[in-house]
Image (spheres, rainbow, N blue to C red):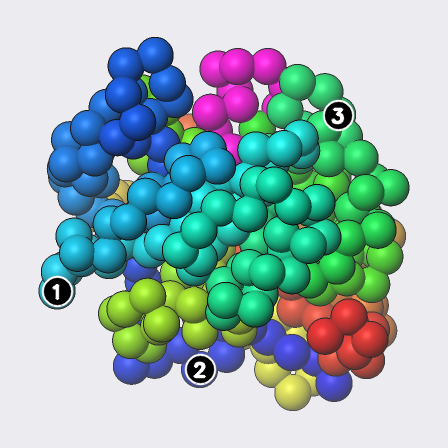
Amino acid sequence: MYINPYENLEGGRWVKTNFHTHAGTGEGTCGRHPIDFVLGLYRDLGYGAVCISNHDLYTDTSALSDDSFCLIQGVEYSADPHMLTIGVDKSFHELPHQAAIDETNKQGGFAILCHPNWIRKEYWPYEKLNALSGYAGIEVINTLIYRLSGSGRATDTWDYILRQGKLIYGFGDDDFHRPFDAGRGYTDIYAREFSAAGIDAAIRKGAFTASTGLSLDYLTLDGGGKIRVRVKFPTETYVNKFYYRFINENGVASESYGESAEYAMAGENYVRVDAIADSGAMLFAQPVYSSVYFAADR
């Protein structure tokens, strides 16, 4: 049986979200800009949710949510290698990684491993990825890294983990430090309820994408195992053709260019879809997967 995390997307809305945002910690720090200034930037960019996730410091922004903008609570755990602990009200930086993940999960939150290819390939060593359990996913795209050192894209790490039988998701963040970072990478979440709880439920289902500028129009799976997918730009444009790739545990299984794409599954453990525009804008969809393959992990 294959599970499609984008099945029955109805009755909700897409929420443009950034989980990795530094603000309000003062001059000379990653979060030098005031929180109200930073949140104003994200409102202007059409975001619906943001997490102020400062290094090893919980920043209570719960009172800043309103009917159109949701503040999610979280902290960036900064003992190398870094990770985001989302949905928590304290920092777990004094704990080892596994204990911090466990405590995050106990609080009803989830952990995202940050920028796996920052500075060097395997900033997050594969051995450590194998040893840890209970994390929700990785930043498959972190656009800050492109102006620092290394690669902001981590599909190589993502595919490695999936091949080990761990169902983890790909997130997108801009890792905001300065105004020119805002909006370059994000997580687009289909939430049935516009609230922190609704966003959390969508994350656990996998009903979201990582993006640098594209939106998912649809990704369906029929009874015969055929995946159909189409992406688009979020604003009105005549540009409607994109490069699509279908990736399984053996690598790239199919590539095409057009308004949409199809792929017939043939017994793979999982298939995920990448899409890219001529402009370079990218979208990474969560895998369609065999419930048997990931059964032990889930």
| Up/down of 17 relative to 21, above or below | below
Q: Nearer the viewer, mark 2 or mark 3?
A: 3
Residue under label 2, please give it: 8
Type of residue at label 3? Lys
Q: Where is residue 103 in the image (x, y as percent from the top left)?
A: 59, 60
Q: Where is residue 33 in the image (x, y as percent from the top left)?
A: 23, 23
Find the distance from the CA under tag 2 to the CA under tag 3: 37 Å
Disc on res. 121? 3
Type of residue at label 1? Asp
Marks 1 and 2: in contact by CB < 8 Å? no
Instruction: Specify the segment rendered in magenta.
Output: 138-151
Q: Which of 268 and 134 is in front in this view?
A: 134
Type of residue at label 2? Asn
Q: Where is residue 293 in the image (x, y as percent from the top left)?
A: 82, 73
| Mark 1 vs 3, N-terminal side | 1
Find the distance from the CA under tag 2 to the CA under tag 1: 25 Å
| Mark 2 vs 1, N-terminal side | 2
Residue under label 1, please give it: 67
Find the distance from the CA under tag 1 to the CA under tag 3: 41 Å
